[in-house]
């Protein structure tokens, strides 16, 4: 099958979790990936070489990068974006070039060293999780865009080619946006491991707990998607079953971390979801919280 080659060519800086998945998807979507730029050290270069082999690109250390591509996409950790951009600022003429980074929390200002030299800059954040040994499809994945007009237009076109869904986010909203995103995967995982801890109290080891939890987790997600949070909500809080909640709190005193998570989520449920016996449940959760804090 003939692959349509896209007008924009791209260099990726950083062959980590996001950079690897993105480079592969961009390559498959028909973008020429020119260079995979790594730090000047051999383990970093080896990672870049592996990715370069799979994307038809050249693996280069920062000190050797030509940066000839029109788009330079920084896929480095948030704390490294500004310094990685500064390190490349005097290497080429940035006029007419486009620079992206993919931080959810930081704005395109992180790339100001390149903007001052004539680049058009944007933050381009996929609301998706990228970890080792998994490459999520980007189809229908939302991408939050923010930055200069030309860079945002280019980002929209790239996202369209990846079959993602671009949307605009104001720079002032990026921190809140990223806090929202943090609930959708990292903190959800934290909830899952807390649930595994509670399973231990029931004599079920974590690996078995994980396997036994998956059907209800999957069904909950499906119900949430189809019927929304109210339609998907079940359990002792919607039934207003204060005696059961009281017993939960008693047993959870054996694990103060799980107790705190349960109490915080139960209070959020009282605030945001339908329930019977709201006042009694609220009183129960308030009382138990202070006892937990004093029991240390
Ligand atoms: N992972 C996600 O789920 C996800 C989702 C959306 C957005 N993002 C964003 O994507 C960006 C990268 O995150 P990540 O999770 O992919 O991080 P990561 O897996 O830690 O990868 C970061 C990569 O950057 C390289 N690197 C670090 N400093 C560098 C520098 N100064 N110059 C060149 N390369 C450098 C690292 O290489 P070495 O350590 O090998 O030298 C590593 O390959 C972040 O802005 C993050 O907010 C991540």
Image (cartoon, grey):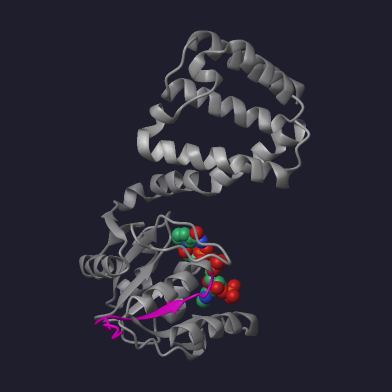
Q: Is 228 displayed left or right of 129 in the figure?
A: left
Comparing 229 with 169, the one in front is 229
Picture layout, residue 265 above or below residue 243: below
Residue 259: percent from the left, percent from the top? 67, 27
Image quadrant where one finds the N terminus? bottom left
Q: Is 3 displayed left or right of 272 in the figure?
A: left
Q: Quadrant of residue 29?
A: bottom left
Picture layout, residue 240 above or below residue 107: above
Q: Residue at x 35, y 68 (%)?
A: 112
Q: Is 296 displayed left or right of 280 in the figure?
A: right
Comparing 287 with 220, the one in front is 220
Residue 184: percent from the left, percent from the top? 47, 46
Picture layout, residue 82 above or below residue 118: above
Q: Residue at x 47, y 79 (%)?
A: 87
Image quadrant where one finds the C terminus? top right
Residue 37: percent from the left, percent from the top? 48, 82
Magenta-colored span: 1-16
Residue 277: percent from the left, percent from the top? 50, 9
Secondary structure mainly formed by the magenta segment: loop
């Amino acid at each position: 099958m003939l692959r349509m080659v896209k007008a924009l060519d791209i260099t990726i800086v950083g062959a980590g979790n996001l950079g690897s998945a993105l480079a592969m998807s961009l390559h498959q979507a028909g973008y020429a990936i020119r260079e995979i730029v790594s730090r000047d050290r051999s383990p970093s270069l080896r990672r870049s070489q592996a990715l370069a082999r799979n994307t038809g690109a050249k693996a280069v250390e920062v000190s050797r990068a030509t940066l000839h591509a029109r788009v330079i996409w920084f896929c480095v950790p948030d704390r490294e974006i500004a310094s990685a951009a500064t390190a490349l600022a005097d290497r080429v003429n940035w006029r007419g070039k486009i620079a992206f980074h993919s931080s959810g929390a930081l704005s395109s200002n992180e790339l100001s060293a390149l903007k001052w030299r004539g680049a058009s800059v944007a933050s381009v954040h996929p609301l998706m999780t990228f970890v080792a040994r998994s490459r999520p499809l980007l189809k229908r994945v939302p991408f939050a865009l923010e930055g200069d007009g030309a860079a945002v237009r280019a980002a929209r076109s790239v996202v369209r080619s990846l079959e993602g869904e671009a949307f605009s986010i104001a720079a002032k909203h990026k921190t809140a946006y990223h806090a929202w995103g943090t609930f959708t995967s990292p903190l959800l995982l934290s909830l899952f491991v807390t649930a595994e801890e509670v399973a231990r109290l029931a004599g079920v080891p974590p690996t078995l707990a994980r396997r036994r939890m998956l059907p209800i987790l999957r069904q909950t997600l499906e119900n949430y998607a189809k019927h929304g949070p109210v339609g998907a909500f079940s359990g002792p809080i919607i039934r207003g079953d204060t005696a059961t909640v009281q017993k939960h709190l008693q047993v959870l005193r054996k694990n103060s971390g799980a107790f705190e998570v349960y109490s915080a989520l139960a209070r959020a449920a009282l605030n945001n979801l339908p329930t019977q016996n709201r006042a009694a449940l609220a009183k129960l959760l308030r009382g138990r919280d202070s006892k937990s804090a004093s029991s240390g």
